[in-house]
Amino acid sequence: MVLGEEQQIDEDNKLEVMRHSAAHVMAEAVQSIFPEAKFGIGPAIENGFYYDFDLPRSLTPDDLPLIEAKMAEIIASNVPFVRDEATKEEARRLFAAQPYKLELIDEIPDEKVSLYRQGLFVDLCRGPHVSSTGEIGAFKLLSIAGAYWRGDEHRPMLQRIYGVAFDTKEALAEHLKKLDEAARRDHRKLGRELDLFSIHEEAGPGLVHWHPKGAVVRRVIEDFWKDEHIKRGYDIVYTPHIAKLDLWRTSGHWEFYRDYLYSPMEVEGQEYIIKPMNCLGHILIYKTRQHSYRELPLRYAELGTVYRYERSGVLHGLSRVRGFTQDDAHIFCRFEQLEDEVVGVLDLARFMIDTFGFSDYKVLLSTRPDKYAGTIEDWDKATETLSQAMIRLGVDYDIDPGEGVFYGPKIDIKFEGWQGPTIQVDFNLPQRFNVTYIGEDSQEHSVVMVHRTVLGSMERFLASLIEHYRGAFPVWLAPLQVKVIPVADRHLDYAYKLEAELKSEGVRVEVDARSETVNRKIRQAQLDKVPYMLVVGDREVTASTVSVRLRSREQLTSQSFDSFKEMLRTAITDRVKELGWQ
């Protein structure tokens, strides 16, 4: 038995080690409350830790304070973490009543296993841990969730307790404050409150139903996306939702990504699958005729809905779904055109990011992985080309070694919590499908193919947009831009006149004709996060003016209707990004 062995902890890993130790303390606390508990695993994660348990009853939020109190006792006792070793046979006897630990022991290749003890509690663990429980800082248990053992839906469902831990109470309080703000911004909560979308278990998890208001936001984004792509030389295309399985065998997707593809369906003796991506349809369109070097580059863009199997345990609102619409495009070009094309995509991506009000992101250049298609020479040339394109635009980026996809290097733009634009060079599909052009020498040459998105998927992008603005969309994106609020029924005619005039100019407007007080109507419009409220009463009718309120509760001076329309028109046309109206 060795005290403190392998406890030399790198300063950068100190928090991670402390959080791992907190997971062990939580497991001991749970065992003291539920002696018959069966233990899964309990790792450190970003900002905290979790542990999976098989318990005699379902936990409730009321259990968390009890477990926290027991953890506090264990920490206050300041008992040491002690590392020990045992043969696998000794470990099996020690964990005879723990089936999940026995399974883990069987998978360990070594003859001896590492154990850690604190007091009377012992766990199977590689470590390291802090020296004693007293070194565990400020912590809090946050939530309970279901988790399949080993992430396999065919295995038992365990109960997972999540917690966070930090060095100091101040750091914990700051983190909890951020979590509280994140909860208020949660797109799933706001999606329900603002009536934007829903997901129905009876229809299938991970499949999104867009409500009228959410569909408006999505349509405005899609129309803007299409118009901007057409301006920049893209052709909009549409491809089917299903295709023969042989197509995906040829591409390699069936071999490499089979676990994420839906099972084939038989149609007239042929096997089909629903498409997991749009690129093969674009290749088939390109190959309908021979192309000259003079025609290149060709840019095909599609808002194409695709389907991929994601385990139910990882599905999360709009940000992780099974059916999603990619803002997809594929560029077919000559190698010497690649840098200019990447510059064009980066410029478009930055324009999109800025227009929608995002600013905090990082850019990564992902290089060749261990397993790759194409030659090292092509990889090096393509990677250097991507680098030069970013240098031309003054983009600061970091190298992400070995994280390119198997078919080529890529540029990723990442935001906190979500994957944004991506630009990927592909050597694989042009070879597999013989995608060529006729060069100046009258010979066939393989095209360079670029996969790219500038938003990601519409679902994940909308999730990020909802959370970024906390549902208070800029005027140009708001599902309802103006709410007209008559003070009394005698003002309805004037209200409907204003509504008709605004609708004729394409404004999304609605009269609140309910038999409610003005204050209640204003309050509802604020809850619905409508940017502008026009309150009209006797004075407004007489003077042909409007009293303007903002969703921020700010009241503007009474003004002419024409003056208001000009202000509204500017906010929409300029796509004003106003974060204050939340």
Image: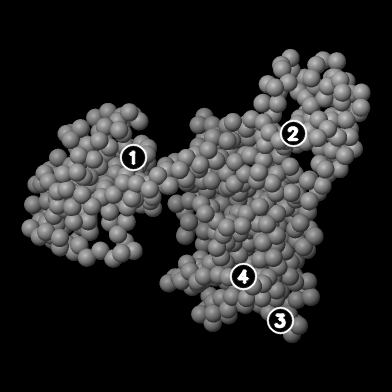
Cβ–Cβ below 8 Å for labels 2 and 3? Answer: no
Q: Name the image quarter holding the N terminus.
A: bottom left
User: Looking at this rendering, what residue extends furthest in the front direction?
Assistant: 557
Task: Tell me which numbered mark, 2 or 4, is placed earlier along the sequence.
Answer: 4
Kind of residue sitting beneath label 2:
Gln
Name the residue tied to disc 2.
555
Q: Disc 2 to disc 3, how far (Cα)? A: 70 Å
Q: Disc 3 to disc 4, how far (Cα)? A: 37 Å
Kind of residue sitting beneath label 3:
Gln
Count neighbours of disc 1 (C-alpha within 10 A) and say few if under 14, some if 14 to 19, many if 20 or more: some
Name the residue tied to disc 4.
395
The percent position of residue 29, horizontal first and vertical second, equals 21, 38
Foreground residue, 189 or 522?
522
Task: Tell me which numbered mark, 3 or 4, is placed earlier along the sequence.
Answer: 4
Residue at left offset 76%, top offset 83%? 440
Count neighbours of disc 4 (C-alpha within 10 A) and say few if under 14, some if 14 to 19, many if 20 or more: few
Kind of residue sitting beneath label 4:
Val
Identify the image quadrant of residue 482.
top right
